[in-house]
């Protein structure tokens, strides 16, 4: 089974209008509707806060802020990729189960009155 036969998940993102600024603003307003976005952002936020707190004890606040930003972006991106891969794997497994299930058809009653 090739990956091209698996349909992509439905997009809940707003349609593109061609205006980059408007499209970016609308996408940011609807980020909670995107799959995996909420969990990955919260994971990145928690990791960034923890690292910034630890770094803030030993360095200046600006350096701790830089550590927060880097950690937030890196962890959120990795968590999002992991979540997307898990969803893709699950979708492939569901498609395999559906394809391997026996086809069922209704039998027409031959003695219809």
Image (cartoon, rainbow, N blue to C red):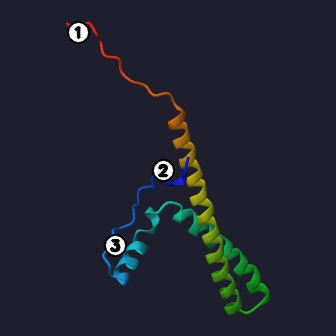
User: In front: mark 3 or mark 1?
Assistant: 1
Q: Which residue is mark 2?
A: 5
Q: Residues within 10 Å of mark 1 (few under 14, many from 20)?
A: few
Q: Is residue 88 left or right of residue 28?
A: right
Give the secondary structure at mark 2. helix
Q: Residues within 10 Å of mark 3 (few under 14, many from 20)?
A: few
Which one is earlier in the sequence, the residue at label 3 or at label 1?
3
Q: Tell whether label 1 touches label 3 (CB within 8 Å).
A: no
Q: Position of residue 103 (x, y in %)?
A: 45, 28
Which one is earlier in the sequence, the residue at label 2 or at label 3?
2
Q: Which residue is mark 1?
A: 112
Report the Cα–Cα distance between label 3 and label 1: 54 Å
Residue at image position (35%, 68%) is: 14
In this view of the protein, which residue sits in the foreground, 17 or 41? 17
User: In front: mark 2 or mark 1?
Assistant: 2
- Looking at the image, is 33 positioned above or below residue 5? below
Q: Position of residue 2 (x, y in %)?
A: 55, 51
Which of the 4 image quarters holds residue 63? bottom right
Residue at image position (59%, 51%) is: 89
- Looking at the image, is 90 positioned above or below residue 32? above
Which one is earlier in the sequence, the residue at label 2 or at label 1?
2
Quarter of the rendering occupied by the C terminus? top left
Give the secondary structure at mark 1. loop
Q: Position of residue 64 (x, y in %)?
A: 70, 86
Q: Which residue is mark 3?
A: 16
Report the Cα–Cα distance between label 2 and label 1: 41 Å
């Amino acid at each position: 089974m090739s990956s091209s036969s698996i349909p992509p998940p439905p997009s809940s993102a707003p349609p593109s209008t061609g205006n980059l600024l408007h499209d970016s603003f609308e996408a940011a307003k609807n980020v909670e509707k995107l799959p995996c976005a909420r969990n990955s952002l919260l994971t990145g936020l928690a990791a960034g806060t923890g690292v910034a707190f630890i770094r803030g004890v030993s360095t200046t606040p600006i350096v701790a802020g830089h550590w927060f930003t880097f950690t937030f972006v890196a962890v959120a991106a990795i968590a999002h990729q992991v979540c997307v891969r898990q969803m893709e794997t699950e979708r492939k497994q569901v498609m395999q189960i559906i394809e391997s299930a026996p086809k069922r058809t209704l039998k027409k009653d031959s003695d219809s009155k």
